[in-house]
């Protein structure tokens, strides 16, 4: 049974996971799983926001567009194989839920599911989005991360629940 927790108690752990093996973003119906390493947590508009960056080439991108919600799932270190699979295979080609052996449960405040095997999950409602602009982005970053274009869309998810 999941319990709602204070963001301050799991902030450090979330940053460590983002910096390390990544975390799993779930969006859409049917849901798609994708590993992400880029994201921020903070306050905007008086709300607690999780921003995630998704390239248009990802299958998850269309799921984010259609669902208006997402969950972010932190997994114990033993799940490195699943994190690498969700970060290298596309939901267009593979049933990642079956391949990972995950059990999905319906979200508590959103309809998007979370991973039962996760240690912590965030539930978010998308309240804003925009595309990175090549003309205003640092030229070094543009060259390093976007030689083929495919600039990320930034999705702002209001955190409506954090559970452990
Ligand atoms: C550690 C790690 C972090 C990643 N972070 C991101 C990210 O923040 N944004 C992104 O668009 N892709 C990221 N990726 C790449 C996607 O996870 C990968 O392209 C995935 O296969 C997309 O799946 P989909 O096509 O089912 O959406 C990351 C991959 C790894 C391994």
Image (spheres, rainbow, N blue to C red):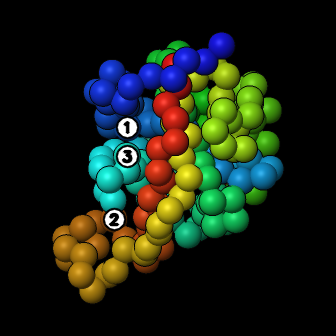
Q: Residue at x 59, y 48 (%)?
A: 70
Pointer 3 or 2: first along the chain: 3
Is label 2 within 8 A of ligand 1 (CB to nearest ligand atom)? no
Q: Residue at x 65, y 29 (%)?
A: 115
Quarter location, residue 152? bottom left
Rendered location of residue 78, percent (x, y): 53, 15
From the image, which quarter does the N terminus lie in?
top right
Q: Residue at x 47, y 44 (%)?
A: 159
Q: Residues within 10 Å of mark 3 (few under 14, many from 20)?
A: some
> Would residue 139 be seen by someone viewing this image from the given angle?
yes
Q: Which mark is residue 144?
A: none
Of 101 and 105, the residue lying toward us: 105
Q: CA distance from mark 3 to mark 2?
A: 28 Å
Rendered location of residue 136, percent (x, y): 24, 81
Viewer-side label of 3, 2: 3
Quarter location, residue 26? top right
Q: CA distance from mark 1 to mark 3?
A: 18 Å
Of 157 and 61, the residue lying toward us: 157
Quarter location, residue 6? top left
Q: Which mark is residue 145?
A: 2
Mark 3, secondary structure of its residue: strand
Q: Residue at x 37, y 46 (%)?
A: 48
Up the image or down, 36 lies above or below 6; here it is below
Q: Mark 3 — residue?
A: 48
> Would residue 75 be seen by someone viewing this image from the given angle?
no
Mark 1, secondary structure of its residue: helix
Pointer 2 or 1: first along the chain: 1
């Amino acid at each position: 049974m999941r319990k709602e927790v204070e963001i301050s108690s799991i902030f450090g752990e979330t940053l460590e996971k983002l910096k390390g093996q990544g975390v799993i973003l779930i969006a859409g119906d049917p849901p798609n799983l994708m590993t992400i390493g880029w994201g921020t947590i903070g306050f905007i508009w008086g709300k607690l926001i999780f921003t995630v960056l998704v390239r248009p080439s990802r299958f998850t991108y269309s799921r984010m567009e259609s669902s208006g919600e997402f969950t972010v799932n932190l997994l114990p270190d033993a799940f490195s194989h699943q994190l690498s699979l969700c970060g290298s295979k596309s939901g267009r080609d593979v049933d990642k839920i079956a391949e990972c052996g995950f059990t999905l449960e319906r979200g508590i405040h959103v309809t998007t599911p979370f991973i039962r095997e996760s240690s912590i999950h965030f539930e978010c409602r998308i309240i804003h989005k925009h595309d990175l602009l090549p003309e205003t982005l640092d030229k070094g970053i543009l060259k390093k991360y976007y030689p083929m274009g495919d600039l990320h869309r930034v999705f702002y998810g209001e955190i409506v629940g954090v559970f452990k």
